[in-house]
Image (tube, rainbow, N blue to C red):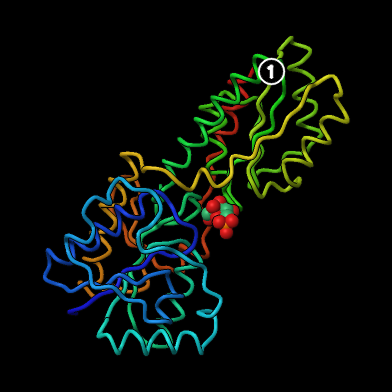
Amino acid sequence: MKRIGVFTSGGDAPGMNACVRAVVRAAVYHGLEVYGIMRGYSGMIKGEFVRMDSASVANTVQRGGTILKSARSQKFMTKEGRQQAFDQLVNNGIEGLVAIGGNGTFTGATIFEQEFGIPTVGAPGTIDNDLYGTDYTIGYDTAVNTALEAIDKIRDTADSHDRCFFVEVMGRDSGYIAIPCAIGGGAEIVMVPETAMSVEAVIENLQNSYTRHKTSFIVVVAEGEEEGNVHHVARRVKEALPQLDTRVTIVGHIQRGGSPTAADRLLASQLGIAAVEGLMNGMKNVMAGIVDRKLMYTPFDDTIHKRKVINQSFMRMVEILSV
Ligand code: F6P
């Protein structure tokens, strides 16, 4: 293999740039040519390729977002789109790919390899931390810290006004961001998609806390929570406990931006190098990840179909700590 391409795809995540940098520098170190593919699969279809060298990734390790930009491509989901992407890669002599993204990215890469034989090795780039095959994804640590900082600020005003705040954090179908925010932010309750908690249980918990003379409350609600969205939960609680002065805050896309933490920069750098070395060793359809502090390559099929389980003891911790 002489020439590889690297791209970021799906929702951006802090640390993606550190990973692109590691891929580029590892490629240069090993004597490979490397091209940046702009806007994920969308740019691959259009042939938006940029030759990269060591200098092109200077001063990027600390930057949030992704210098390669990102997109969710509908066209790549069609055979016609993938054919165009393949033609572009062949015309530009690109023989292997490093994909930095999540499940949607790896699903596309798997189909692409089956149809056209272009190998891809992945690095887990998503704030959601919902990928099997790595204990942490690139961007997760930063997103948790961002959300936690927001919750700390909300706590100040909640306390001043004796209010009950419902705070929604990101995570699509997963409570990975919500749980450490609830533990670290001193929340009374956390609601996550993985564990059923009825609004009735939330009401009962808040009623008990109120009876015990607590005056302010934080309820962390993961986006994608099964009881409905944060506004729905807050409305139901207000109906049942009109004595509570309730407010809703959605932390939102703030969680996707910002300078990556040290942990994210380290993880991104490690996995970027591992992805390039995996490709050079003939790997394909695998994601580089860290499991129990060891580098592992997990088949895309597993990262896509196996579910990373939430540690239930963390839910119990929230209950104990809010007593
Ligand atoms: O996958 C990352 C993520 O931020 C999820 O937590 C969230 O559900 C989704 O992306 C939001 O997507 P968009 O940026 O398209 O609104």
Which image quadrant for residue 78? bottom right
- x then y, percent, for residue 204: 80, 26
Tell me if 232 is positioned left or right of 42 in this view: right
Which quadrant is the C terminus positioned in?
A: top right
Residue occupied by mark 1: 216
Q: Is residue 311 above or below residue 244?
A: below
- x then y, percent, for residue 164: 72, 24
Q: Is residue 36 above or below residue 314?
A: below
- x then y, percent, for residue 293: 30, 45
> Can you tell me whether the CB of the residue at mark 1 lies under 8 Å from the nearest atom of ligand 1?
no
Element marked by disc 1 = loop
Callout 1, which amino acid?
A: Ser
Q: Looking at this view, is 308 or 12 the one in front?
A: 12
- x then y, percent, for residue 117: 35, 85
Q: Is residue 78 above or below residue 169?
A: below
Q: Residue at x 43, y 52 (%)?
A: 13
Total residue callouts: 1
